[in-house]
Amino acid sequence: MLDVAPPTLHTRLRDWVMEVAALAQPEQIRWCEGSAEEFEELLELLVDAGTCEPLNPELRPQSYLVRSDPADVARLEDRTFICSQFEDDAGPTNNWREPDEMREALRTLFDGSMRGRTMYVIPFSMGPLGSPHARVGVEITDSAYVAVSMAIMTRVGRGALDALGTDGEFVPCVHSVGVPLVDGVKDTPWPCHPASVHIAHFPETREIWSYGSGYGGNAMLGKKSFALRIASVIARDEGWLAEHMLLLRLTSPEGVVKHIAAAFPSACGKTNLAMLVPTVPGWRVETIGDDIAWMQFGDDGRLYAINPEAGFFGVCPGTSELTNSNAMAAIRSHAIFTNCARTDAGDVWWEGMTAEVPDHLIDWRGKDWTPSSKTPAAHPNARFTVAARQDPAIASEWEDPAGVPIDAILFGGRRSTLEPLIREAFDWRHGVFLGATVASEMTAAAIGTVGRLRRDPFAMLPFCGYNMGDYFAYWLRIASERDVAKLPRIFYVNWFRKGDDGHSLWPGFGDNSRVLKWVFRRCEDAADALYTPIGWLPTTEALDTDGLDISADDLEELLRVDLHEWHDELGSLHEHFATFGHRLPAELAAQLEALAERLGA
Ligand code: O2Y
Ligand code: MN
């Protein structure tokens, strides 16, 4: 095995790297430094291997298209495991595996799994370098595609090693595509081993092992695996929060700034909201983050948040100048596209990108495609990977080491019925109840039947590294341990309600700024609201609909609380809470009873 001198005196890190190398038996080890030259070199390797295809530099400078194996296209929740010592500590919403058994299985899988390949060692920081809230991880991978993706999505190299010093804590993350190059096996553009995928998390020892998939959240281990699953455990133990939330900065026409965190299940438009261009005159939205927030209480009793990531791994289909012009500007150059279609001119294309559909494309599988084709040109989970600094709406404070103070937290999901456009929780505990009951109708990005309602508490169902009942209790404890007057206000939004005939009642996108304006004014105690059994709702006058093409009937329907439908919902909520058994906090059961009482049930 070809080895180079490790660029660190951190003995534990060096020993661990050699241990993994002894197991996986790579041909060579390469420590990543995170430089531009290294990035270029890895991309060249990927082009030579047929993994990456350069796009036309005149249309999409310094950008590449990647096609994954058609069997490796999304996060795999049923192959994702929480390996806590006790099953009850993983809880009913996670796939639990006994840690020793999983270690044994992983030892077998990883034994020689990197033969004939380069083993990349990627030291990375989640959070701005120098921030007291940042944490270091080290990912070992045999995928150059993962190495370049991590270089965009995190802060890789010297800075992370310096933050570690000689004995700092790091989260070890091991990844292999699971295709050793032995016995004449020829490499493929997207090596993977779909039949044996394992994404295993060990919350007590804070380790991550991922095998068999090279795609997104399965392989870029800084993102969902570290920044959510493992970080949620670290956060619980240390008194902070690791959440599946976007972060945005909202400035009013008077120049007053508020920061909003929002948790929506996958495929509910977090990136679009984080990059929103307001239609309400005088208001401005800037992005802090589009997917993950780490939040800690400051000495002043307020909650401060950082975005631990450095890039966006955004979904392409549906992204356009109309739905997210900031994302479109961000990906104009220096972007990696995965599973998009390619135009004859050498650019990328996906469903919803332009009103006009090209006459001919090469689809995400590499096949000829025309508008009469029966399958989509781009995979529904096709993604762009791009540095956050390329977003024209990125806030100047997005890397503030201290984080930004949070004024409001939004929960939400995709529901075509029942859920009004916006409601405000009565208080923090009621807000936790709203978070605990988040539900969304499923789309292609998540596992399951499209259209079926899935409860996704706090949008953390696939990402909470411990028992969700304990997670609820942890959120509830904040109300007794903190000055509630300084806590963010909590809201629940639904952009997706439909009328009886199936038409969307709310235009969404830029017009969501109208809802943000009401949230902002509520935080100033300057907007009217109506008391209802499910929370405070805007009066129709309090919601700014100036210049909006919406009928009075549709507006009324958007804000209607149908007591019969809510009665029916109680059964589903009881069933949901029953999942958590004795770990469900009594306070949440009481919140449900109180709701039933308010509904007159
Ligand atoms: O399939 C994947 O690996 C992508 S999933 C994803 C990507 C970016 C942000 N969020 C998500 C998610 O599933 O929540
Ligand atoms: Mn997400």
Image (tube, helix red, strand yellow):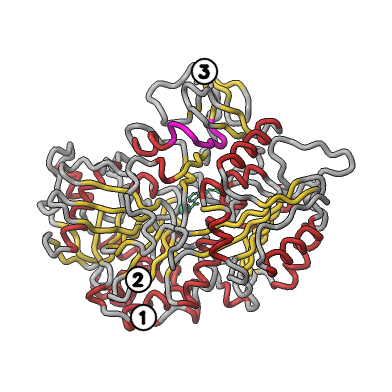
Q: CA distance from mark 1 to mark 3?
A: 59 Å
Question: Residue 195 lies in magenta, yes or no?
Answer: no
Mark 2: secondary structure:
helix
Mark 2 surroundings: few (<14), some (14-19) or many (≥20) residues within 10 A: many
Q: Which residue is mark 1?
A: 587
Q: Is residue 417 left or right of residue 151?
A: left
Q: Which residue is mark 2?
A: 432
Tell me where residue 580 appears, x and y as whole percent: 49, 74
Q: CA distance from mark 3 to mark 2?
A: 50 Å
| Residue 273 can be seen, yes or no | yes
Q: Is residue 265 left or right of residue 22?
A: left
Mark 3 surroundings: few (<14), some (14-19) or many (≥20) residues within 10 A: few
Mark 3: secondary structure:
loop
What's the residue at 57%, 45% (across, down)? 35
315 relative to 536, above or below: above
Q: Nearer the viewer, mark 3 or mark 2?
A: 3
The image quarter containing residue 598 is: bottom left
- Most common SS among magenta residues: loop
Q: Quadrant of the C terminus?
A: bottom left
| Residue 500 can be seen, yes or no | no
Q: Which residue is mark 3?
A: 345
Tell me where residue 333 appears, x and y as whole percent: 46, 32
What's the residue at 40%, 26% (across, down)? 354
Residue type (three-letter) at the residue carrying disc 2: Val
Labelled pair 1, 2 in contact (Cβ < 8 Å) = yes
Question: Residue 334 lies in magenta, yes or no?
Answer: yes
Magenta residues, start to end: 331-340
Q: Earlier in the sequence, mark 3 or mark 2?
A: 3
Query: 485 or 440, which is in the foreground?
Result: 485
Residue type (three-letter) at the residue carrying disc 1: Glu
Q: Nearer the viewer, mark 1 or mark 2?
A: 2
